[in-house]
Amino acid sequence: MQTSRDRERIQIEMKNMNREHAHAILLKGMTQLTGSQVSDVLQISHGNLRVILHRARNELAAVLQA
């Protein structure tokens, strides 16, 4: 269960992330957009989006565990 403190920390950490990584997480995780639509918005291939999301999620998880 996420608390408001957790959400605040995630927002802070995402501001410090690589911009492309943060945008990918926001668009894919917090909107109703499909992967293809997110790829179009970011002007990248669907395969590249998958790589970026994987890296971004790992980066965010690492900083949140620290």
Image: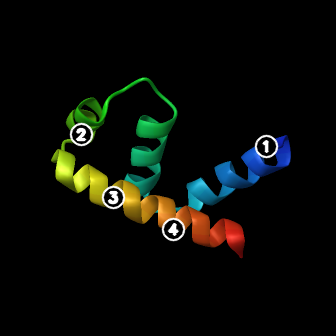
Badge 4 crowding class, 10 Å Cα cut-off, few under 14, some 14 to 19, many 20 or more, is some
Provide the residue designation for mark 4: 59
Earlier-in-chain disc, 4 versus 3: 3
Question: What is the three-letter code of the residue carrying label 4?
Answer: Glu
Choose top left, top right, bottom left or bottom right for residue 63: bottom right
- Tell me the tag on residue 39: 2
Alpha carbon of mark 1 to alpha carbon of mark 2: how far? Answer: 30 Å
Q: CA distance from mark 1 to mark 4?
A: 21 Å
| In the foreground, 63 or 12 | 63
**In the rendering, at what x and y percent does residue 60 appear?**
56, 62
Residue 47 is situated, as x and y percent measured from the top left of the image, at 19, 52
Q: Amino acid at mark 1?
A: Met
Residue to which mark 3 is pinned: 52
Mark 2 and mark 4: span between their CA atoms? 20 Å
Q: Secondary structure at mark 2?
A: helix
Q: Residue furthest front?
A: 1
